[in-house]
């Protein structure tokens, strides 16, 4: 689907890291480290403490949706104005009900 090539765990276009980068970066930073990450990466890590802001933790999805946790990051799909049919097909899939289910399975917040 990506550049008309396979994008699956058995293909060369897919890489699974042994661990997310949050842990390795914080280990390098040591006791003086501050880093940003996604909640799904942070909540399962032993050396990471999620910082509450104004007493609100981001591990409650509702605090993200209603923005009571004030630090959020939006992710955008960006494509060239003139793009290939494969890219158009991927964007349609990403916005479809099935694509949004995958977004939610990856522990991000779906659009709809």
Image (cartoon, rainbow, N blue to C red):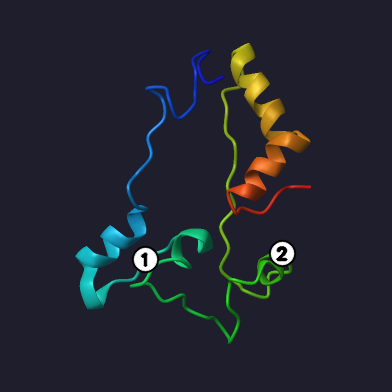
Asked if residue 108 is positioned above or below residue 55 in the image, the reply reads above
Element type at mark 1: loop
Please state the horizontal and vertical placement of residue 17, each as a whole percent of the image: 34, 44
Asked if residue 18 lies left or right of residue 74, the reply is: left
Residue furthest toward the bottom?
55
How far apart are the two marked residues, 2 and 1, measured between alpha carbons?
Answer: 22 Å
Q: Residue, x 59% and y 71% (percent of image)?
A: 59
Q: Residue, x 24% and y 78% (percent of image)?
A: 31
Instruction: Give the class, few, some or many, for how many residues have Cα within 10 Å of label 1's Cα (few <14, many ≥20).
Output: few
Q: Residue, x 58% and y 71% (percent of image)?
A: 58
Which quarter of the figure has residue 72? bottom right
Q: Residue, x 53% and y 13% (percent of image)?
A: 4
Asked if residue 20 is positioned above or below residue 84 in the image, the reply reads below
> Is residue 83 at all visible to an observer of this figure?
no
Q: Earlier in the sequence, mark 2 or mark 1?
A: 1
Which quarter of the figure has residue 101? top right
Residue furthest toward the front?
10
> Is residue 87 at all visible to an observer of this figure?
yes
Q: What number of labels is visible?
A: 2
Element type at mark 2: helix
Q: In the picture, which quadrant includes the N terminus?
A: top right
Q: Nearer the viewer, residue 13 or 3?
A: 13
Instruction: Give the class, few, some or many, for how many residues have Cα within 10 Å of label 2's Cα (few <14, many ≥20).
Output: few
- The circle drawn on residue 35 is 1
- The circle drawn on residue 65 is 2
- The circle drawn on residue 9 is none
Asked if residue 43 lies left or right of residue 88, the reply is: left
Asked if residue 33 is positioned above or below residue 86 in the image, the reply reads below
Please state the horizontal and vertical placement of residue 83, each as a whole percent of the image: 59, 16
């Amino acid at each position: 689907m990506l550049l008309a090539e396979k994008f699956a765990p058995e293909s060369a276009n897919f890489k699974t890291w042994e661990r997310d980068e949050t842990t390795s970066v914080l280990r390098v930073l040591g006791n003086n480290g501050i880093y940003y990450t996604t909640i799904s990466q942070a909540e399962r890590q032993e050396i990471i403490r999620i910082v509450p802001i104004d007493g609100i933790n981001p591990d409650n999805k509702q605090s993200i949706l209603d923005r009571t946790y004030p630090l959020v990051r939006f992710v955008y799909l960006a494509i060239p104005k003139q793009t290939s049919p494969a890219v158009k097909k991927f964007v349609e899939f990403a916005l479809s009900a099935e694509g949004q289910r995958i977004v939610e399975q990856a522990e991000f917040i779906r659009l709809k």
